[in-house]
Image (spheres, helix red, strand yellow):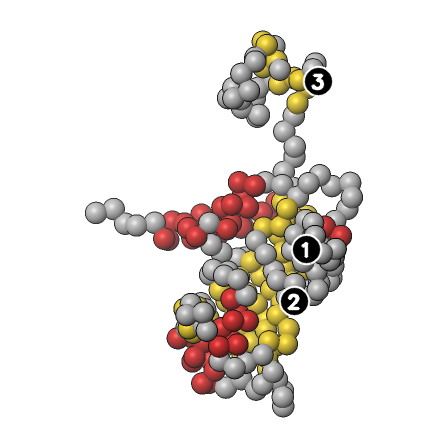
Amino acid sequence: MRLNGAIRRDPEAHVYLDRDRIAVDGKPVAATAKIYLMLNKPRGVVTTTSDEKGRQTVCAFLDSALPWVAPVGRLDKASEGLLLLTNDSEWAAQILAPASHLNKTYHVQIDRVADAALLESLGRGVRTDENEFLRVVSVRILRGGKRNSWLEIVLDEGRNRHIRRMLAALGVEVLRLVRVAIGPLPLAQLDKGSVRALTDEEKQSIDQAMLGRAMHLRPSPC
C-alpha cells in the first residue's frame, strides 16, 4: 500500500479517507459514496440481506447496480411500512443507539373496537407473559368500524415485536401493522415495495432530530 506516495506495510496504519491518497497495487482507493434509502416494506418480506430459508428479503426491491446497503433496524415479517437502508454503518448505529432513539409512528389495525379502557391500559404500560414491561409514548384511535379499529401508536424504542406483544398481553390481535414515520421522516405516498433516496433535507432533518434527542437526554451538569 502507498499512503500519500510512501510505501506503508503496517495494516493498522491510520488514514483519513477525506484527505489522504491511498493506492493498492498502484490503483487508487476511494471512499464509497454514502447512500441513504427509504423502502416501503411489504408484508411477508424479511428484513435481512440474505435468508437461509429462501424467503424474500428487502434486497429484492433494490437496484442490482447499487453498492452494498443494510437495513437500519428491523420490521418483522408480518409488519410493513417505512424502513431505512444505508451503507453508512456509523449513521445507522447512531439511529439505533438508546441516546438518540427517534420516535417511530405506527398505524395498527386490531381485531376489536378500541375503547378508552384499552387506550388507558396501553398508556400505563403492559407487562407481558415473559414478565417484560413494555410502554408507548402515545396512543390514539385513528378510526373505528363495527368489528375493528385503527390505532396510532408512537414508540421511542423498538423491542422485538413490541406492539404485538403489548396488545397480545391484553388479549388483542393485530391484523395489520404499518410503520408510517421514523422521527420527522414520513412514509408519505411511497408505493409499497418502492425505494427512493432520501433528499438532503430529509437526511438533515433526521440528523437534527437525533442531535436534539441526545441533547435532551444528556444529564445536566452539577
- Distance from the alpha carbon under mark 1 to that under mark 3: 35 Å
- Distance from the alpha carbon under mark 3 to that under mark 2: 46 Å
Residue corresponding to mark 1: 39
Q: Is residue 185 visible?
A: no
Badge 2 amino acid = Ala
Q: Residue furthest right?
A: 64
Q: Position of residue 44 (x, y in %)?
A: 70, 64
**Pointer 3: residues within 10 angstroms few (<14), some, or many (20+)?**
few
Identify the disc placed on residue 78.
Answer: 2
Residue corresponding to mark 3: 27
Q: Quadrant of residue 128?
A: bottom left
User: In the image, 42: left or right of 88?
Assistant: right
- Viewer-side label of 1, 2: 2
- Could you tell me which secondary element the residue under label 3 belongs to? strand
Residue at screen point 53% across, 84% down: 114
Q: Quadrant of residue 4?
A: top right
Badge 1 amino acid = Leu
Q: Position of residue 31 (x, y in %)?
A: 63, 29
